């Protein structure tokens, strides 16, 4: 009886899942997913598409410019919510860890707002050319206006030699966003203009056509110290890279190479090396009959792991190899010292 009373109650699985989600997901990615989930839940009570979608007729005539920013965060479809979780928990988490929460949030807002502005301009031009009011009654809404831009930017900067799996097919990475557009068109029976614009914006970011819109290091640090100071203490906040890594403009210090996130670097590429490298094998010679100072000596505590053993190796075998190498090195050094003593006695 007492044992049943002392036993702790089983944890709530829903609460445990939310705590795990909050702990493992970066701040901005978590906020975006939470806002999409709330939007989907509220869609059963009230439709948020009508007051928040980017419809040129309302955005221009009523000057409701907030639609340009809030339209991407409306979600009324369960399928869109599932795809958003799959994409953001993969691409979003990696990109936020690479850029930092501030820069990643600015990137999401920039892609979404820029896509809606271009959509607005094209609709107005269509209405001016055809005098058809239906061009102003279209809408741009949904998280896909942001996701397609992020995916296109990643695929563009990754390079054309690589490939990605698309269901049962393999497509070049550069054309992966276009394959997504074709899939969406076949699935829904049509292709929204805003999705095409978002892919174009992502390609433009990948080809560095919008570098001026990127958030610079100085401005990011100033925002984090003033506007976003409270957010920097929250769980999941990711600080941005240091000044030497985060640089959107060319400079003489890094040989005119702008910093690129790790996930966007081509395979094998490394960030610019520092000029303060110190080599252990540099020997300094002095004039006269003295000895050379700084003679390179093989260190006995370094064990070279064969490539085939990397990732899965026997720790005991490596320790034994290190011990044998150290004994051999000590014996070699003693032999050298004895030879020097015999030469000195002669």
Image: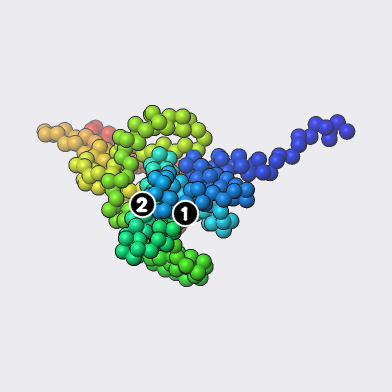
Mark 2 neighbour density, 10 Å: few (under 14) some (14–19) many (20 or more):
some
The number of numbered badges drawn on the structure is: 2
Front residue of 202 and 190: 190
Front residue of 263 and 235: 235
Residue 330 placement: quadrant: top left
Spatial CA distance of label 2 from label 1 is 12 Å
Rendered view: 143 above or below 345: below
Q: In which quarter of the image is the C terminus?
A: top left
Residue 99 placement: quadrant: top left
Q: Residue 230, labelled with which disc?
A: none
Residue of label 2 = 117
Front residue of 12 and 134: 134
Front residue of 74 and 257: 74
Is residue 48 in view?
yes
Residue at 47% from the left image edge and 54% from the top image edge: 141
User: With 283 as the anchor, is 32 left or right in this view?
Assistant: right
| Disc on the earlier residue, 2 or 1 | 2
Q: Where is residue 81 in the image (x, y as percent from the top left)?
A: 55, 54
Residue of label 1 = 141
SS class, disc 2: helix
Residue 195 placement: quadrant: bottom left
Residue at 57% from the left image edge and 58% from the top image edge: 79
Rendered view: 292 above or below 166: above
User: With 110 as the anchor, is 277 left or right in this view?
Assistant: left
Q: Position of residue 310 (x, y in %)?
A: 46, 53
Residue at 21% from the left image edge and 34% from the top image edge: 293
Is residue 297 in view?
no
Q: Position of residue 107 (x, y in %)?
A: 38, 46
Q: Position of residue 234 (x, y in %)?
A: 50, 33
Residue at 88% from the left image edge and 33% from the top image edge: 1
Residue most toward the right? 1
SS class, disc 1: loop
């Amino acid at each position: 009886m007492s044992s049943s009373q002392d036993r702790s109650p089983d944890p709530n699985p829903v609460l445990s899942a939310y705590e795990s989600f909050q702990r493992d997901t970066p701040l901005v990615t978590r906020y975006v997913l939470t806002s999409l989930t709330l939007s989907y839940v509220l869609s059963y009570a009230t439709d948020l598409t009508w007051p928040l979608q980017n419809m040129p007729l309302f955005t221009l005539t009523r000057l409701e410019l907030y639609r340009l920013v809030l339209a991407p965060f409306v979600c009324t479809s369960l399928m869109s919510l599932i795809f958003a979780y799959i994409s953001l928990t993969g691409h979003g988490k990696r990109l936020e860890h690479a850029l930092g929460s501030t820069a990643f949030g600015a990137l999401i807002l920039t892609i979404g707002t820029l896509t809606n502005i271009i959509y607005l301009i094209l609709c107005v031009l269509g209405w001016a050319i055809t005098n058809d009011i239906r061009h102003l009654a279209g809408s741009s809404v949904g998280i896909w206006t942001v996701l397609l831009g992020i995916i296109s930017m990643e695929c563009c900067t990754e390079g054309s030699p690589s490939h990605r799996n698309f269901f049962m097919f393999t497509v070049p990475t550069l054309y992966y966003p276009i394959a997504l557009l074709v899939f969406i068109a076949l699935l829904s029976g049509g292709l929204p203009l805003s999705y095409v614009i978002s892919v174009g914006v992502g390609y433009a970011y990948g080809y560095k056509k919008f570098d001026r819109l990127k958030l610079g290091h100085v401005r990011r640090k100033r925002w984090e110290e003033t506007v976003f100071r409270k957010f920097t203490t929250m769980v999941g906040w990711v600080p941005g890279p240091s000044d030497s890594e985060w640089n959107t403009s060319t400079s003489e210090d890094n040989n005119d190479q702008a910093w690129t996130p790790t996930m966007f670097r081509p395979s094998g590429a490394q960030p610019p090396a520092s000029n303060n490298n110190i080599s252990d094998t540099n020997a300094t010679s002095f004039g006269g009959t003295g000895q050379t100072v700084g003679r390179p000596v093989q260190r006995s505590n370094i064990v070279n792991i064969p490539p085939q053993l990397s990732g899965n190796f026997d720790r005991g075998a490596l320790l034994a190899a290190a011990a044998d190498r150290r004994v051999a090195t000590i014996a070699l050094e003693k032999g050298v010292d004895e030879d020097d003593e015999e030469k000195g006695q002669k």
